[in-house]
Image (cartoon, helix red, strand yellow):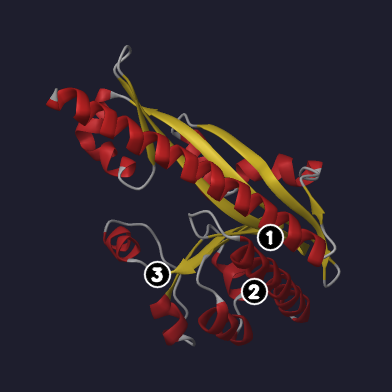
Amino acid sequence: MAYVLAAVAFLAILVAGWLFRQFSEGTRDSDLQKMARHLAMDFRRGLVEDLRLALPRFRVISNAMGKGADFRAGINTITGSRRGVRLAFFDCDYARVLDDDTIHNGGCVEALFDLTFLDPVRGERTVMRRFSAVAVELSFGAQPLVIRPERVVDKIAGLIGYEDIDFDSMPEFSRKFYVNGPDRRFAGRIITSAVARFFMDRVDCTVDLIGPWMLLYTGRRLSARQAERYLELASELAGLLSREYDAV
């Protein structure tokens, strides 16, 4: 009898969790739609074709696809323009099957931070990651460049050969932000003192540039209020980078 009660209680918890998730998803969708209306932007119209084609070139997405992940973008899209530049907010997810070697070599640590599903028949563990991103169009073609607040893992990576571009004239910025890209001259051209100050004052996410697009993301899903903030941040940063790039 005790086992039956335990099973019923466990099932009730699962059902309650599913219902809460459905309610939360519905509330978020409604909030996103209201926010899009407030900003005079389109909700769920999809991503423009040139952005969709550019997405696999961004590092966070190319890394996921390189690991064999099944990637989807363009969920819950909000598209339009602000300050004369095209913008898009969207949700992404990717699913990746962890094989035995990956799990034994520490890949299961990744599952601690994502949704994990176990197929008892095949014995496969699938990790699903969900996050939001904001893309903004630039007025110039950018070389590949990633800028983000420096983390412990970045310091460790620097010890084993992964380059963090430092700027002798901006030591505070160099201490606080990780900058990585194949073209140091390009990085030096767009990261001026004004851009460095903007990052230190305003930016708390990863900024990924390539070609005519820039991607901002935190690695997690954003609420409607957070999405509005990052849309505003992206449009301001795009304008600043364009002005600084043209001034050189």
Q: Residue at x 32, y 57 (%)?
A: 161
Residue annotated with mark 3 = 150
Secondary structure under tag 2 reads helix
Answer with mark 2 or mark 3, whichever residue precedes in sequence. Answer: 3
Answer with mark 2 or mark 1, whichever residue precedes in sequence. Answer: 1
Q: Locate the C terminus by quadrant.
A: bottom right
- Residue 232 sits in quarter: bottom right
Residue annotated with mark 1 = 142
Residue annotated with mark 2 = 190
Q: In this view of the protein, which residue sits in the foreground, 230 or 5?
A: 5
Residue type pointed to by label 3: Glu
Picture coordinates of residue 214 (x, y %)? 66, 59
* Contact, mark 2 vs mark 1 (Cβ under 8 Å): yes
Separation of marks 3 and 1 at Cα, in angstroms: 22 Å
Q: In this view of the protein, which residue sits in the foreground, 137 or 163?
A: 137
- Residue 50 sits in quarter: top right
